[in-house]
Amino acid sequence: MIVNKRIGLIILLRESAGVLLLLGAWDLVVVILYQLFHQEWMEIPSLPVSLIGSALALFMGVRNNSAYARWWEGRTLWGAVTNNSRSFGRQVVSILGGRPDLVRAMAAYPHALRTALGEVDGSADVRRLLSPEMAEKIEGWTNQPNGILVQLGIGVTGEATRLKIDGALHGQIDRILSDLANAQGGLERICRTPLPIQYSMLPRALANLFCIVLPLSTVQTLGWVTPLGSSLVGLLFIVLDKAGDDLQEPFRNSPHALPMASMAHTIERDLLQSIGEQPGPPVQVKKGIQP
């Protein structure tokens, strides 16, 4: 996730530079054909193109709102994972008297979750934190985050039985695991259910078509200035489309995705400190991007 505004602006400009050059080249071709070779077929009325642009802007606004809703829901669910993971560590220490293996397994859970959701492999962090016994038990699970939750539930139940913990207290810890499972289900739903193709592909196709037609309707008015005016307007639509595309996949390995690695390491650091272990250094922001 981009956290430095200045560097973020540079990234956005770099990502848009190629499109801007392509639009400028097409606009230049149009204005040369019209001004020097008098291609009258290019005299398209501006009113229809203006109406199309207004409709396209509204359509993109709806799509981008839907894409941002997916991104923000993903961040909200990761917040639930963070809060419940900390609560689990606190309950294990205060109610069960401390079980470092269970707390470390919970610290491994967000790393397993980000691995299952995203395109970055965090399995090394999972192996580093899980006990050999628990790592062996979840080996081969197609859904390793769920496997860790299952083993945590078994471990909590066994410890509560051994210590003769009251059922109500045991239920508090079990509800935390259920809340984690619910948050994981929501994250998996976002990951495995893309936006409908009408929202994901149609805006880009329409924006590209609009950028092709736009200079044909402005060249009569702007003349040689067409590459400047038409390119900037076309770039606006292309950038709007790209913003929606970046946000609709919040777990993609890109500068615009959620900082799952940073959140997972934050959870790990808090949990390890609760059992008196020294955590590793926090994840550093690199070139204005929080991983």
Image (cartoon, grey):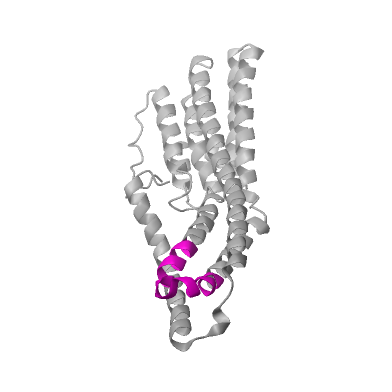
Indicate the position of residue 86 as horizontal and vertical percent values.
Answer: 49, 26
Q: Is residue 277 above or below residue 264?
A: above
Indicate the position of residue 231 as horizontal and vertical percent values.
Answer: 44, 67
Q: Residue at x 58, y 39 (%)?
A: 73
**Observer-nearest of 211 and 9:** 211
Indicate the position of residue 12 as horizontal and vertical percent values.
Answer: 40, 56
Q: Is residue 98 above or below residue 73?
A: above
Judge whether residue 136 can be spotted in this image. Answer: yes
Residue at the extreme front of the image, as rendered = 221
**Observer-nearest of 263 and 227:** 227
The question of residue 143 being in magenta is answered with no
Judge whether residue 201 can be spotted in this image. Answer: no
* First to last magenta residue range: 213-235
Q: Is residue 76 above or below residue 228?
A: above
Residue 188 falls in which quadrant of the image?
Answer: top right
- In this image, 31 relative to 10: left or right? right
Q: Residue at x 38, y 58 (%)?
A: 13
Q: Residue at x 61, y 47 (%)?
A: 66
Residue at the extreme bottom of the image, as rendered = 37
**Observer-nearest of 56 and 32:** 32
What number of labels is visible? Answer: 0
The question of residue 224 being in magenta is answered with yes
Indicate the position of residue 27 as horizontal and vertical percent values.
Answer: 45, 74
Q: Residue at x 33, y 50 (%)?
A: 7
Secondary structure predominantly adopted by residues drawn in magenta: helix
**Observer-nearest of 191 and 288:** 288
